[in-house]
Image: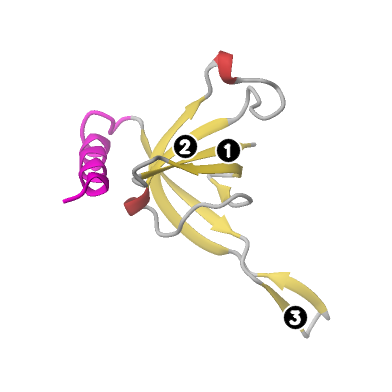
């Protein structure tokens, strides 16, 4: 097993054990590709639904700058192997908009900044 696999296994164990009370299952949607709708003559996009589980948290006061990070923003940490689709900027996750998506150096988790 590589570092990524070890990290994901350890984090999954923590999600099921010590962090179980903080882990939340979520649903999300990604704007699908635009398609022409002959009935309306317009272009519409069918959202692509996906799900996963992760830990929602707020930002520390010293991280809030009022521009890039607002006091009401949430941070979501998601195991990459426990989500059915990669989160992306513009996705709606648990009713909030993803404004930034990053991965850790081992590519084991995504950190998603969410805004209401």
Q: Which residue is mark 1?
A: 114
Return the x and y of residue 4 as percentages of the image width and height. Answer: 27, 47
Could you say whether the residue bearing mark 1 is in a helix, strand or loop?
Answer: strand
Could you say whether the residue bearing mark 2 is in a helix, strand or loop?
Answer: strand
- Between 62 and 105, which is closer to the camera in this rendering? 105
Return the x and y of residue 24 as percentages of the image width and height. Answer: 39, 39
Distance from Cα at disc 1 to Cα at disc 2 = 7 Å
Q: Which residue is mark 2?
A: 76
Residue visible at 51% across and 25% down? 58
Return the x and y of residue 115 as percentages of the image width and height. Answer: 63, 36
Precedes in sequence: disc 2 or disc 3: 3
Residue visible at 78% across and 85% down? 38
Return the x and y of residue 109 as percentages of the image width and height. Answer: 38, 43
Image: magenta residue range: 1-21
Q: Is residue 95 left or right of residue 104?
A: right
Mark drawn on residue 37: 3
Which residue of the protein is positioned furthest toward the right in this rendering? Answer: 41
Could you say whether the residue bearing mark 3 is in a helix, strand or loop?
Answer: strand
- Between 52 and 89, which is closer to the camera in this rendering? 89
The answer to whether the residue labelled 3 contacts the one labelled 1, judged by CB atoms less than 8 Å apart, is no
Q: Is residue 19 magenta?
A: yes
Q: Is residue 84 left or right of residue 1?
A: right
Q: Is residue 76 magenta?
A: no
Using the rendered view, name the quadrant where residue 44 is placed. Answer: bottom right
Image quarter of the C terminus: top right
Q: Nearer the viewer, mark 2 or mark 3?
A: 2
Residue visible at 60% across and 64% down? 47
């Amino acid at each position: 097993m590589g570092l990524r696999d070890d990290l994901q296994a350890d984090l999954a164990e923590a999600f099921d054990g010590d962090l179980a009370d903080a882990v939340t299952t979520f649903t999300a949607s990604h704007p699908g590709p635009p398609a022409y709708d002959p009935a309306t003559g317009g272009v519409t996009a069918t959202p692509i639904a996906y799900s996963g589980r992760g830990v929602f948290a707020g930002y520390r006061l010293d991280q809030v700058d009022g521009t890039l990070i607002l006091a009401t923003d949430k941070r979501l940490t998601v195991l990459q192997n426990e989500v059915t689709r990669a989160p992306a900027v513009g996705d709606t996750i648990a009713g909030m908009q993803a404004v930034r998506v990053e991965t850790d150096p081992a590519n084991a988790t995504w950190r998603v900044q969410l805004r209401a």
